[in-house]
Amino acid sequence: MKLLNLILIFCPLFIYGQDAAKDFCIPIDAVASESPASITLNWTENTATGTTYNIFRKDVGSSGWGSTIGSVATGNTTFVDNNVEVGDTYEYLVQKVSGSTLYSWGYINAGIQRDLTANRGDILVLVDETFETGLSSELDQLMDDLYNDSWMPKLIAINPADSPQDVKAIIQAEYTALNDLNTVFLLGHIPVPYSGNLYPDAHTDHEGAWPADTYYGDLDGNWTDVSVDNTVANDVRNDNIPGDGKFDQSQTPSSLELEVCRVDFHDLPVYTATEEDLLRDYLNRAHDFKVGAYVPLEQAVYDQGSFTGMTEGFAQNGIRNFAPFVFNSNIFEADYATSLTTESYLWSYGCGPGSYTSAGSLDNGTSLTSAELGSSISLQASFTMLFGSYFGDWDKTNNFMRAALASGNTLSVSWAGRPNWHYHTMAQGDHLGSAAKMSMDVNTDYLSLSLGVGFVTGEGVHMAQLGDPSLRAYYVEPPSVLTVSNVNNVAELSWTASTDVSVDGYNIYRRTASSLWTQVNTSLETSTTFSDATIPSGGDFEYMVKAVKLKTNGSGTFNNESLGTTISALFSVGIVDLADIDLSFFPNPTKDIFTIKSKVAIQEVLIYSMAGQLISKRTNASNQIQIDLSDFDKGTYLVVAKTDQGLSSKRISKI
């Protein structure tokens, strides 16, 4: 990520008010309109100096912000982008400047009815073999959930006594073998890499090697163990000397190939539950979240503790990230512990003077401790960020971050403040691991702060995301009881409807064991049945049905999907010309219009590409129907006619 040096010589670049967290932030939310298509960005004014808001836009996943797409004078807090299309999503940067001096900035990924991806790629789940048997049911559920959310999961048990180098060799081998490995989920006490000569919490007694899961995500960087020789830290874990198995690098050597996230409850005796039970509880509540059994209130809270006046404005991580999810109107500054034990929140942020096992001022002005989390305080925020001294070094007995991850309904935790984290893409349906990689990665387009006093913050190897990387911020309750019947090589699907409120319809996907998912419906199916007459070849085909519900939030709209429900069926030959059921198709070939004629009423006509994609659907109530192909490309199409006697299909050539 790009770093802004915050050292004395450069202080004139910024104007710091009493609350630097708010002065650094432009918290942006958006409203999407379909006709005419537009995205309206809204933000709140802060007290930082500046004369102009500059607005930039880029495609999600692309590099570089390019030139501004517009500017407005300070005092204005709205910008309308009319150069947008329904179905697309865009990433925006808004900067508050005076001349060339930057004072505040904010990000948002906004869109209009964006569709989620049908294929998320391969995900490698590395589980501590200690728990493979005891957690077999929960692991089966996890793998099912991943598969039903369009991942291709693979589970490998890891010996916790292995070295990080051994684990990385396994990851590298899978990266080569799998088609699209992009995510690694470390579950349990998978060997912890240590690297660097850094102290990002600014405590010289904490200088040395820190836990460095980024090592697992960087497959081609040069990680060495020859130069750092430092034993000044109070904890021997941080000692780093040549040849000790801890790496030299304080910053990730090259761009990350993989998203890496961890759920690890090793050595948390403040909880009476065993490590296995803590893992089980986490997996179960993550499952409940994914199937819509638990839905937090769409609001966010942040607590700066005693850090309100600090120049770095750590809580900017909360304020800036929250608005795209919950709108500015649903962001609250309040006591952390009180808020999160009173009602649920989608997001939270808390910072204060820290120790390995506590964060100061987050519990009505006193420290919130790991011991309290393990006994009397149950946090009700699904996604949280924390910051304070020492506990960013998470591989420690009763570590505060890991204790928070084990608490209540918490699903993710990061140490956000040195550097900044960027989660805004999740508000348009992206997953946690992707946002984590975007935050951790080298040379990205997102600003952070560096104190400039000799220790690494941005792109540091210490950056870690705790939580299931596949998590999305929003889910829909899935359909159930999917059945399929092979009727003359036509797949007749039926399912039980989702119990979610106001589901818009369903998407139907198909794949073979060696292929990706292909969507076979061209518009949302609003009933609970579907006919697929376009099986492209004989064999075993799997179908998945997902409920779809338009999600409106602080980032516009997108078509949110549930986890799928799946079933397989064997088809002997694939696309065939079924025996006519008193139907005739003419002329064939045709340049434009062809006719279907029957002795009985034709109820429906479906036209498919030869790849199996439904491209047209006509309802009918007569014995004859004319179909106009003049707007179709030249080629062969499969036409399926439904009558009360059954189905008949015919290949029609458009010339």
Image (cartoon, rainbow, N blue to C red):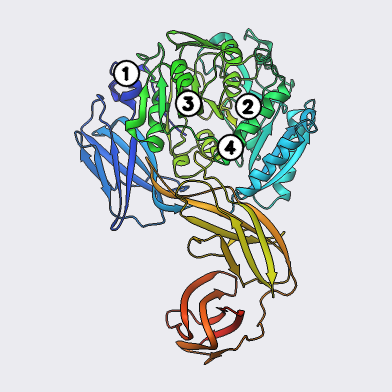
Residue type at mark 2? Ala
Tag 3–tag 1 contact (CB < 8 Å): no
Q: Mark 3 = which residue?
A: 419
Q: Residue at the spot x=77%, y=28% of the render?
A: 163
Q: Earlier in the sequence, mark 1 or mark 4?
A: 1
User: What is the number of the mark on residue 19?
Assistant: 1
Q: Residue at the spot x=33%, y=32% of the render?
A: 328
Q: In this view, does 244 lie above or below 223?
A: above
Q: Is residue 608 above or below residue 107?
A: below
Q: Earlier in the sequence, mark 3 or mark 1?
A: 1
Residue type at mark 1? Asp
Helix, strand or loop under label 3: loop
Marks 4/2: CA–CA distance: 14 Å
Q: Earlier in the sequence, mark 4 or mark 3?
A: 4
- Camera-side mark, 3 or 1: 1
Q: Mark 4 = which residue?
A: 254
Q: Earlier in the sequence, mark 3 or mark 2?
A: 2
Marks 3/2: CA–CA distance: 15 Å
Q: Which of marks 4 and 2 is nearer the N terminus?
A: 2
Percent x, y of residue 620:
46, 78
Residue type at mark 4? Ser
Most foreground residue, 128 or 4: 128
Tally of numbered discs: 4
